[in-house]
Each structure stands twice: as structure tokens, then as C-alpha cells.
Image: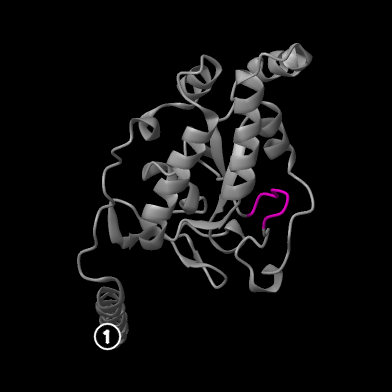
Amino acid sequence: MGVIRILLSLFSLVFKALDSVGILWDARLRLSEFIYGKHGITVRVPTKSILKLPACVIAEYIKKRKLTCVEVIEAFRDRILEVNPILNAVVGDRFDDALEEAQHIDQVLDSSDINLNQEKSVLLSKPLLGVPITVKESIACEGFTNSAGLVDRKDKIASEDAAVVKNLRDAGAIPIAVTNCSELCMWWETTNNVYGRTNNPYETSKIAGGSSGGEGAIISAAGSVCGIGSDVGK
């Protein structure tokens, strides 16, 4: 009987502890609702047809001059500016530089100057010519911060591209922005003390998963054609 009493006492303590955890969790949910709203919103469906095209089609249209490279970059820039204030997915951009690169591509492709024929041929051979991409902030992209969400690295600027970014540039892609991630890419929620929380584009009261949540959110919201992430078990 003494053993039974001890076991009952232990069970009672466990249930009280679980009840305390439940109270704390409920308080966390109430606070979250106060900050983000009980029910969030879904980002507006994109209206520009460019935003719905896959990368291979965009590159083909640019090469065949059905679209200009500038039109493409401007469309995705405008979409990011529209949705990012409620998502906090993009944490750095190079819109001006991207537009300069796009203008150069258009000038070469539209030129009748025979001196540019070789450069034009090189551009037309690139499979991702003019395709705007985004890059997870933890992956080095020259000129961007490369903190991986760690406060001690918040001023770290990448001096060169990671190999994967270089390869995509060589294929003709144009990086336009870097996106949020979990701290040191260690967690499955995208939030950190450098950039804050990234929201789910389908329900902004919910957090984006991770660690490549910024990429997932901005691509899902049609703010990027495709991007570079890094996750385990996906």
C-alpha cells in the first residue's frame, strides 16, 4: 500500500506540472494572438502573369524577346515590395543592381551591332537567362549580410558568392534578394534576433517553417521564381 501511495503522489505531481505547462502554453498563445491577431490574413493573389511563370519559361521568353529582362525584374521587385511588409521574408535586396544587369541583357539581345554577336551568343546559351532568384541569408551572396540570424554576425557581409550562387549566376540567373532563416539554421521556425519572425503567406498569424522559411514564404507568395535554401530531410 505504501508503494501505491507513493506512485499516486508522483502521478499527482506530474499532472500538476503538466497543468502548469498547459497554463503557460495557453498564455503564450494569447500573447501571440494579441501581437499577430487571432486570425491572420492571406497575401493577395498575384495579378501579373509573369509572376506565375516557371523559370524555364521566363528564360525562354526573354531569349525570344516575348518579355524583356527589365519587365521580369520589375515585376518581382514590385511583388516583393507589396508582400514583404506583412511577411518579413526578404531581409536584404539588390533591386537597383539587378535592374542594371537586366538592362544590359536587354541591350545586348536587342542590339544589331555585330561586335556584340559573341556576347549575345553567350547570353542565349544560358539556361536561366534573366531569371530573378532569392538566396537564403545564411548562404554567402556577395555584398549581402551573411549572419545566419546570429546577433554576433549581424554586420558580417559576404565578400564573395558561395559556389551554388556563382553557378546560378553563370547560368544567367540574377539574385535580387536574400531571405530570412532560423538562427544558425538550427530550428524549424523562421525567427531570429537579427531580423525577427517570418510569417506564413497563407495565414500570417502562423510562423513560416524553417530553416529556409524566408525562401518558402517569398516563393509561395510569388515574390521569387526560385531560390537557394538548405534543409535536412526535405
The picture places residue 35, in percent across and down from the top left corner, at 30, 77
Identity of the residue drawn at 74% across and 19% down: 119
Query: Are there few (<14), some (14-19), or many (20+) residues within 10 Å of tag 1?
Result: few
Q: Is residue 208 visible?
A: no
Q: Can residue 74 be seen in this view?
A: yes
The picture places residue 230, in percent across and down from the top left corner, at 58, 44
Identity of the residue drawn at 65% across and 37% down: 101
Q: In this view, does 70 lie above or below 188?
A: above
Q: In this view, does 113 lie to the left or right of 4?
A: right
Q: What residue type is labelled 1?
A: Lys
Identity of the residue drawn at 27% across and 74% down: 29
Q: Is mark 1 on a helix, strand or loop?
A: helix
Residue 37, quarter of the rendered image: bottom left
Q: Is residue 118 above or below residue 219?
A: above
| Residue assigned mark 1 | 16
Identity of the residue drawn at 64% across and 46% down: 97
Q: What are the residue bounds of the magenta stretch?
A: 138-144
Residue 28 belongs to the span the image colors magenta: no
As drawn, the residue found furthest toward the left would be: 39
Quarter occupied by the N terminus: bottom left
The picture places residue 54, in percent across and down from the top left corner, at 43, 26
Residue 141 belongs to the span the image colors magenta: yes
Q: What secondary structure prevails in the magenta region? A: loop
The one nearer the camera, 140 or 97, is: 97
Residue 172, quarter of the rendered image: top right
Q: In this view, does 163 lie above or below 111?
A: below
